[in-house]
Image: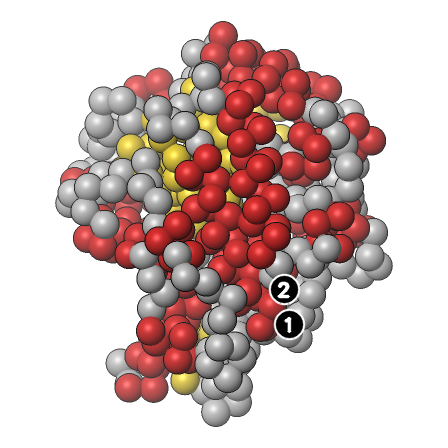
């Protein structure tokens, strides 16, 4: 490993930042309701009863935010489109945003879905219903018709694991349902939605998906712990990468979950449709998972605070918090997990370009944030090492550009390199923003 200050990233490496529509836009009255609007208004679901009604007012302040991105030297901006806003005729907002980004030499990267399912689709069955995938394909076509002439990077879904398993198994995310069989159905229909959307997008764009794969590690080398690792790897990773990369669900996943479902919702041709050519694979990474066999049954891994497990058919598996430093999310800091995932996908899908589509840390609201800088430096060092070892990583999107609504945590956790005063909506770059701007400008860590 080269020393700090001696790590140069490849020419053309994309330096970006990422956000999500519901977390930053606000302007709730200018769009239809989503499952997160409903969830926020369900007592006890979101910290402090916070909502995304105003968020950080990006729908009004977007020009200021783009100027800030340009001042920080960002080469790319990954943002999500609000499905409910598009249904309400709000595609013009994104049309203008794309033009403004391009005018500042910032490459737009569109994410079609970052968890804000229109509420009426949830009432019709949500992601466990096949019709939702068809609706998503139509929505994707609408957005592509408006933006694909200027946007070259497209992400169909952000973290479908969270949508399926936190939304429909543990219930800690919207829509708050707790049916593990529904979570498996949702996972398949999210995969199917990706395939349908990828088929609908024009061939001249690069289309990918942003997964949050888990670097799953056994607590010990015992046979029981290794089997726990295999089972969680199937539910966390291979339930998506199986059909996406190889055109089939893994047999051990189907066997492990047979008591919950016969998988008859997977129709002939589905896996082939999901297996669309990918322009890139997006990797979101924050922390690894350490598992063991346990006679006491499953323990929460940070996603099961309601008492419901996000892991269908994973009885007898325990999750462990590794020792060492943690972020304010109580997530352990271990950049080797990111390195391992990049090398895994480099081996599993040779030649497939990789992008780190999210990585970052929540810390206290201070403007001077050396711990965040340290976190970013360590993870970027891991990416540099992976590139040196042959992983085709072409870019990095820091999470997040600015403080925002952090889902069930409300406004209590801050991931931004830009501080936001929620009372005044004033944006102030933190020391980490200046550090990242230098990195984006020089390409040298």
Please give left or right for residue 412 compared with residue 131 in the image: right
Quarter residue 429 falls in: top right
Question: Residue 66: x percent and y percent?
Answer: 56, 17
* Mark 2 nearby-residue class (10 Å; few <14, some 14–19, many ≥20): many
Please give left or right for residue 85 compared with residue 263 in the image: right
Question: Residue 126: x percent and y percent?
Answer: 66, 56
Question: Residue 424: x percent and y percent?
Answer: 78, 25
Q: Which numbered disc covers residue 168?
A: 2
What residue is rendered at 51% in x and 15% in y?
101
What residue is rendered at 84% in x and 59% in y?
43
Above or below: residue 201 compared with residue 66: below
Quarter residue 357 falls in: top left
Counting residues from the start of the chain, the first of labels 1 and 2 encountered is 2
What residue is rendered at 79% in x and 50% in y?
38
Query: Which residue of the protein is positioned furthest toward the front in this rendering?
Result: 268
Colour scheme in the image?
Answer: secondary structure
Q: Are marks 1 and 2 in contact (CB under 8 Å)?
A: yes
Above or below: residue 107 compared with residue 8: above
Q: Which numbered disc covers residue 350?
A: none
Quadrant containing the N terminus is: top left
Residue that mark 1 sits on: 179
Q: Is mark 1 on a helix, strand or loop?
A: loop
Whether residue 241 is visible = no
């Amino acid at each position: 490993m080269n020393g700090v200050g001696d790590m140069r990233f490849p020419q053309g490496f994309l330096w970006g930042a990422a956000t999500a529509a519901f977390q930053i836009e606000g302007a709730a009255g200018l769009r239809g309701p989503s499952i997160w609007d409903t969830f926020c208004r369900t007592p006890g679901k979101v910290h402090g009863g916070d909502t995304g009604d105003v968020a950080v007012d990006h729908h009004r302040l977007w020009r200021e935010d783009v100027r800030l991105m340009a001042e920080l030297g960002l080469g790319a901006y990954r943002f999500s489109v609000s499905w409910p806003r598009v249904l309400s005729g709000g595609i013009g907002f994104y049309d203008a945003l794309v033009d403004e980004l391009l005018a500042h030499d910032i490459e737009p990267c569109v994410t079609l879905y970052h968890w804000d399912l229109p509420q009426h689709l949830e009432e019709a069955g949500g992601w466990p219903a096949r019709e939702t995938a068809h609706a998503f394909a139509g929505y994707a076509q609408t957005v592509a018709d408006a933006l694909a002439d200027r946007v070259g990077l497209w992400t169909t879904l952000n973290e479908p694991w969270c949508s399926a398993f936190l939304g429909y198994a543990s219930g800690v995310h919207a829509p708050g349902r707790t049916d593990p069989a529904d979570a498996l159905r949702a996972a398949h229909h999210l995969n199917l939605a990706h395939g349908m959307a990828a088929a609908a997008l024009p061939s001249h764009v690069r289309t990918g998906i942003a997964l949050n794969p888990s670097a799953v590690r056994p607590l010990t080398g015992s046979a029981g712990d290794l089997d726990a690792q295999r089972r969680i790897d199937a539910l966390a990773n291979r339930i998506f990468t199986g059909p996406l990369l190889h055109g089939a669900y893994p047999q051990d996943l189907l066997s492990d979950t047979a008591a919950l479902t016969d998988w008859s919702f997977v129709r002939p041709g589905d896996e082939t449709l999901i297996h669309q050519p990918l322009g890139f694979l997006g990797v979101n990474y924050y922390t690894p998972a350490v598992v063991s066999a346990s006679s006491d049954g499953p323990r929460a891994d940070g996603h099961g605070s309601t008492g419901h497990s996000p892991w269908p058919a994973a009885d007898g598996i325990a999750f462990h918090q590794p020792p060492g430093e943690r972020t304010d999310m109580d997530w352990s800091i271990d950049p080797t997990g990111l390195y391992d995932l990049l090398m895994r996908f480099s081996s599993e899908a040779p030649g497939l370009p990789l992008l780190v589509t999210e990585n970052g840390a929540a810390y206290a609201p201070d403007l001077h944030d050396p711990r965040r800088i340290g976190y970013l430096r360590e993870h970027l060092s891991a990416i540099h090492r992976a590139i040196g070892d042959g992983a085709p990583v072409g870019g990095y999107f820091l999470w997040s550009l600015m403080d925002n609504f952090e889902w069930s945590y409300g406004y209590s956790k801050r991931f931004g390199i830009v501080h936001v005063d929620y009372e005044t909506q004033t944006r102030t770059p933190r020391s980490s923003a200046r550090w990242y701007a230098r990195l984006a400008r020089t390409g040298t860590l």
